[in-house]
Image: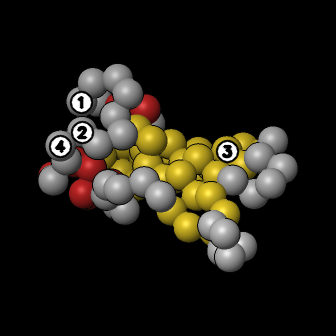
Amino acid sequence: MAIEKFIYGTMNDEDINGFIITNAKGTKAQIIEKGATLDKIIIEDKNGTFIDILSGHDTLDGHINRSDYQGVVVGQY
C-alpha cells in the first residue's frame, strides 16, 4: 500500500492536504482534510480501465461552496 500527500487547495489562506491511498491492484481512495472527505474512489472496471465511482465534487471550491457534505466523515470543517 502506498500513501501520497499533496496540496488539494487553499481555504482561509491555509493549504488543504489531500491523500491518495493505493493498494497493490491499483485501487485508489482519495481523501481530503476538509471534514475527512472521501473525494474519489478509483477502481478497475471489467475492461481494465480505472474509473472514479464516487459522485461529488472535483475541486475544493465545489466542496466549500456547493457542498451537501457528500463524502464528509466529520462535520463541516
Left or right: residue 58 versus residue 44 is: left
The Cα–Cα distance between marks 2 and 4, rounded to whole angstroms, is 4 Å
Query: Comparing marks 1 and 3, which lies closer to the viewer?
Result: 3
Please tell me which of labels 3 and 4 falls first in the chain.
3
Instruction: Find numbered disc 1 in the image and state the secondary structure of the residue it sits on.
Output: loop
Q: Position of residue 27 (x, y in %)?
A: 69, 53
Residue at 24 percent across and 30 percent down: it is: 76
Q: Position of residue 5 (x, y in %)?
A: 63, 47
The Cα–Cα distance between marks 1 and 2, rounded to whole angstroms, is 7 Å
Amino acid type shown at disc 3: Ile
Query: Comparing marks 4 and 1, which lies closer to the viewer?
Result: 4
Residue 8 in sight here: no
Please tell me which of labels 4 and 1 falls first in the chain.
4
Residue 68's label in the rendered image is 4
Circles 2, 4 touching at the beta carbon (< 8 Å): yes
Residue at 32 percent across and 55 percent down: it is: 56
Badge 3 density bin: few <14, some 14–19, many ≥20, Cα 10 Å: some
Q: Quadrant of residue 36?
A: top left
Q: Is residue 35 above or below residue 6?
A: above
Mark 3 highlights which residue? Answer: 21
Instruction: Find numbered disc 4 in the image and state the secondary structure of the residue it sits on.
Output: loop
Mark 2 highlights which residue? Answer: 69
